[in-house]
C-alpha cells in the first residue's frame, strides 16, 4: 500500500494537493510575475526616456508617462502581465533584446496614438 502523501512531498498540481499548497504555489507564481513586472517597468521606463531624448532632443515627462502608462499597456493585455513579459525578455536575452521587443511590439501603436493626439491639437 502506498504511503500517504505529506504536505512536504505532495505535488501541488495534483488533485490531492492541500488548499494551503495550492495557495503557496499561486503566491509564488504571483510574486514571480510581480518581480518580472517590476523589472519590465524599469526597462520600459529607460527605453521611453532614451527614445524621447534621441528623437525629441529634450525631456518630456508627459510623453514618457503616456508611453509607460497602464492605460497604454492595457491595449496589449493586463498591464502587469505586459510589463512581466518585458521583464522576462530582459532576464533571458538582455537589454538590447528587451528594447527590440518594446520597439516592435508596442511602439507602432504608440506612434499612431501620438500622431493622432498631435493632429487633434493642431500640430500636424
Image (tube, grey):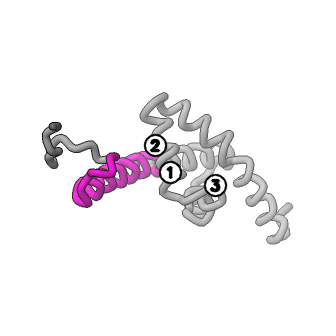
Q: Mark 3 highlights which residue?
A: 76
**Image coords of residue 18 (percent x, y):** 24, 56
- Counting other residues with Cα less than 10 Å from the Cα at mark 1, is it few (<14), some (14-19), or many (20 or more)? many
| Residue 42 vs residue 80, the one in the foreground | 80
Image label count = 3
Q: Mark 1 highlights which residue?
A: 83
**Image coords of residue 90 (percent x, y):** 47, 36
Task: Please tell me whether residue 66 belongs to the stretch shown in magenta.
Answer: no
The N terminus lies in quadrant = top left
| Residue 12 vs residue 47, the one in the foreground | 12
**Image-based side of 123 in relation to 102, left or right:** right
| Residue 114 vs residue 50, the one in the foreground | 114
Q: Residue at image x 60%, y 42%?
A: 102
Compute the Cα span from label 1 to label 3: 10 Å
Q: Is residue 95 above or below residue 52?
A: above
**Image-based side of 91 in relation to 1, left or right:** right
The span picked out in magenta is 13-41
Label 3's element? helix
Amino acid at each position: 500500500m502506498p504511503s500517504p502523501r505529506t504536505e512536504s512531498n505532495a505535488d501541488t498540481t495534483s488533485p490531492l494537493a492541500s488548499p494551503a499548497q495550492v495557495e503557496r504555489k499561486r503566491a509564488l507564481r504571483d510574486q514571480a510575475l510581480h518581480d518580472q513586472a517590476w523589472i519590465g517597468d524599469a526597462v520600459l521606463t529607460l527605453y521611453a526616456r532614451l527614445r524621447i531624448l534621441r528623437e525629441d532632443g529634450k525631456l518630456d515627462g508627459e510623453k514618457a508617462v503616456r508611453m509607460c502608462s497602464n492605460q497604454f499597456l492595457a491595449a496589449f493585455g493586463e498591464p502587469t502581465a505586459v510589463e512581466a513579459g518585458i521583464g522576462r525578455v530582459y532576464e533571458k536575452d538582455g537589454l538590447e533584446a528587451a528594447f527590440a521587443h518594446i520597439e516592435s511590439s508596442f511602439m507602432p501603436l504608440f506612434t499612431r496614438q501620438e500622431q493622432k493626439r498631435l493632429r487633434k491639437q493642431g500640430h500636424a
